[in-house]
Image (spheres, rainbow, N blue to C red):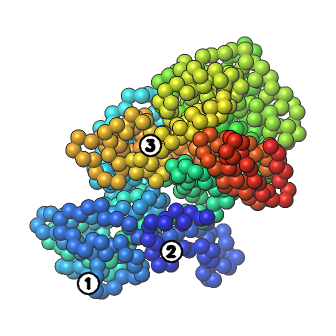
Amino acid sequence: MKLISVFTTVALGASALNAGAELPRVFTAEADTARVKADALSRAYVTPSRVVFTEGGVTDPELLLIPGSGQTDIFSTGMCQLSTVNDSTASIVLDFGRELHGSLRLLISAVSPLKTPHMRLRFGESVAEACSELTTAEVSVAEDFNNSEVDLKANTATNDHAIRDMVLTMPLYGQIETGNTGYRFVRIDLLDPGMTVNLKEATAVMRYRDLPYKGSFRSSDPRLNKIWDTGAYTVHLNMQEYLWDGIKRDRLIWLGDMHPETSTIAAVFGCDPSVEATLDLACEQWPLPQWFNGMSAYSLWYLIIHHDWFMQSGNKDFLDHHAPYITALIDRIDTLVDEDGTERLSEDRFLDWPSSPNKEGVEAGYRALMTWAMTDAEQLCDYIGDEAHAAKCRDIRRRLDKKKMPHNDLKQAASLMAIAGVMDPKKAVGECVAVGGAKGFSTFGGYYMLEALALAGRYDDALDIIRNYWGGMLDLGATTFWEDFDLEWAKNAGPIDRLPAEGEADIHGDFGAYCYPGFRHSLCHGWASGPTAWMSRHVLGVEVLDPGCRTVRINPHLGDLEWVEGTYPTPEGEIRISHRCRPDGSVDTKIDAPKGVKIVK
């Protein structure tokens, strides 16, 4: 399975893929090798799947839904026509069927009168965003992490990170490609009065890594299957030259946000080089003694990511390459943890945005994250043969253990405490994580809440929350998972694929907070993919025990499912797994593992 297969309901234009293209021969001389690089990513042309609505003089808009040749001509028939009268505009809103990353290609044929027209283009992750107006105020990426008071009306539709609202001069008898953002919907407005434009094609240009989906997951519950697929696709779109947070906003490397993404990549794509390239570049951008992205918690996540990635890849050369950074980071942390357990890493504490107001809970979760990171760092030091730094990690944990802090009913904190082993998982889940079901879940922290539920043996509860919380986004039209979501938002809210009806809330424009108010909210954020990795790990039952997946335990938890089957990628090939419940409640398991991978149960 490749990414392009997710477009089962979307028409692709002719010559859709550009896989394996080589540079023209004139650029292959030795003098050109340093300045000319082939694009590592592929492109596909995607025809719209639906006309959402039109306004003004628009005729035959449905012709834009027919895949075209990609070549303009001089004719004025058999194509969509936009006409303006006096001061009016002609407008059309197109739906490309699902979220994608890339640009838009417009082909213009005959124009009357014969002059270059001007069009306004607005890209949107929702119909409402594609129809919104830009605001003058922008949210600073350097704002106080603890500031929960954000004026939603002052900070809504933006061109932050990617230009998604623009006015362009269009060519006559030609084509233009513009935009570089994450979107599903596009609004096109013809601005010139008294003009007619024949629009031959309006095609999305999708840019993506052409990767096979080596991992897979299918079960007796179609809703869980769709959630697994959506998480995989969400991360895939963010695997650009490097691993991004979001494809519309937050097109940056954020180390502290990457762990759900790298976990999903391991379960779906295996050892993709984008992960190692991203970790390399992050170390160049944030050399010690700086914290990654200026936040100490993100340097802790770096150690956890490295540990999990080495377990998946077994790439000792890559681990050795990062060993000086890893050990120097351990040294820095060591100097900032006192004998009584007081730590002084940074004044700023950050777990995820929704947890920010609960400062006491954030403090407890942060300390648990430190303990988790030191546990993983100790194992990394064992793998590189550095006993001195392994011992230092153990001693840091000993000091941290002297000072216990309560989770203060913060699910993110209680989950991290369970994972780190500083709190009994059953206690953490019973008194906090499972209380109210999905209430208090967040798209990033939710992955760790699911992990805590698994540690407590509450697999049925976890599956129900996945169906309700992540499934709640699907019910609102999501084709990728969002930067944040609260089930309370869904009450009386319309889906993203139409404008809100009278009396309805706008699920995109009316919600969001912190750095993502209103339409600034990203509806494709890789950190929200946790259920994909979680279901491969706990439902399909794949637990990697040795670096490079040399030893893998298969321990499924089907809950209320009748059957589960799928694949898991390893450096030696894919493990094929099938579980079916027998009438007596036991599970019949079949496993086909590649040579070099030892399976234990």
Measured from the top left, where is residue 45 in percent x and y?
46, 71
Residue ID for mark 1:
77
Report the number of discs: 3
Vertical comparison of 107 with 507: above or below: below
Residue ID for mark 2:
16
In this orientation, which residue lies closer to the viewer: 414 or 196?
414
**Residue at 50% across / 70% down in the picture?**
44
Q: Can residue 226 be spotted in the picture?
A: yes
- Quadrant where the N terminus is found in the figure: bottom right
Q: Quadrant of residue 485?
A: top left
Vertical comparison of 335 with 86: above or below: above
Q: Is residue 348 left or right of residue 518?
A: right
- Mark 1 or mark 3, earlier in chain: 1
What's under tag 1, amino acid-wise? Thr
Measured from the top left, where is residue 556 in percent x and y?
70, 43
In this orientation, which residue lies closer to the viewer: 386 or 522?
522
Vertical comparison of 482 with 406: above or below: below
What's under tag 3, amino acid-wise? Gly
Q: Quadrant of residue 28?
A: bottom right
Q: Quadrant of residue 177?
A: bottom left
Residue ID for mark 3:
472
